[in-house]
Amino acid sequence: MGELEKMLLEGAKIEFLSEIVGRTIFMFLLILAILRLSGRRGVRQLTLFEVAIIISLGSAAGDPMFQEDIPILYSVIVFICVMGVYKLITWFTARFSFVANALEGKVMTVVKDGMFDIKHENDHDFSKMEFFAEFRNQSVEHLGQVKEGILEVDGTMSILFYPEEDIQFGLPLFPSTYVEINVDLHAGPFACMYCGNIVHSFQNESKRCSRCERATWTKAIKTKRH
Ligand SMILES: [Zn+2]
């Protein structure tokens, strides 16, 4: 047996080859499912597909490098299967939108008309602090500047700004101004620190937000964009 042949085939069991095909397809789908359930925020920029491929092929590519008893033939079969499943799924996602939604998720409205869209409150994807950072990265000083903010499936934020003359009072997003205040000691308008709701004065004693029922307020600001 030549050196090359040994490297490629030694120890390979022909009857095991079809099992590798089955195992690879199963594991690849399992990895995709787990990544999908773990939420898209953790895999910014990379699509779930890319991560699944990296994980699947990483081990298939790496293990034969230093494990003598794994014939490279096995890895080659894994590679072919992963790419085959990948091609098949992309074919389906291109044709059926429900497949795309199931795998990649849908775009999500985060801010609407200058306020956080709180219907996602219990969604584990909806982590407000990350959104604060995302908006600050795009130089948004307060939510009153934002007509609509959309979280794309790749984890990036798309922002539609109000024209300058339509900027409203909004929830400040930078730490120097995002500070809780006592509403009895300050003049309004106030911004709900949780959902961004703006209140000019309180009608009742409870001082709770009419949108989200919380009672932490900061001073709303209305600065223009620079
Ligand atoms: Zn609120």
Image (cartoon, grey):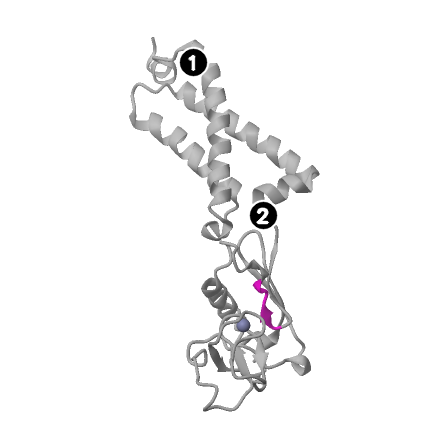
For the C terminus, the quadrant is bottom right
Compared across the picture, whether 122 is left or right of 100 comes to left
Q: Is residue 182 magenta?
A: no
Stretch in magenta: 114-118
- Residue at the spot x=51%, y=58% of the render? 126
Residue 117 in the magenta stretch? The answer is yes
Task: Please tell me which residue lies in front, 11 or 202.
Answer: 202
Horizontal and vertical percent for residue 171?
Answer: 53, 77
Residues at marks 1 and 2, CA–CA distance in whole angstroms: 36 Å
Q: Amino acid at mark 1?
A: Phe
State the residue lying farthest toward the right: 95
| Along the line of sight, the residue nearer the viewer: 205 or 81 | 205
Marker disc for residue 105:
2
Q: Nearer the viewer, residue 73 or 99?
A: 99
| Residue at horizontal 52 percent and vertical 91 percent from the top | 187
On screen, residue 225 above or below 7: below
Q: Which quadrant would residue 102 be assigned to in this image?
A: top right
Residue type of the residue flagged with mark 2: Gly
Give me the disc on residue 33. none
- Decide which of 141, 69 is in the foreground and name it: 141
Label 2 element class: loop
From the image, tell me which residue sits under label 1. 16
Mark 2 and mark 1 in contact (Cβ < 8 Å)? Answer: no
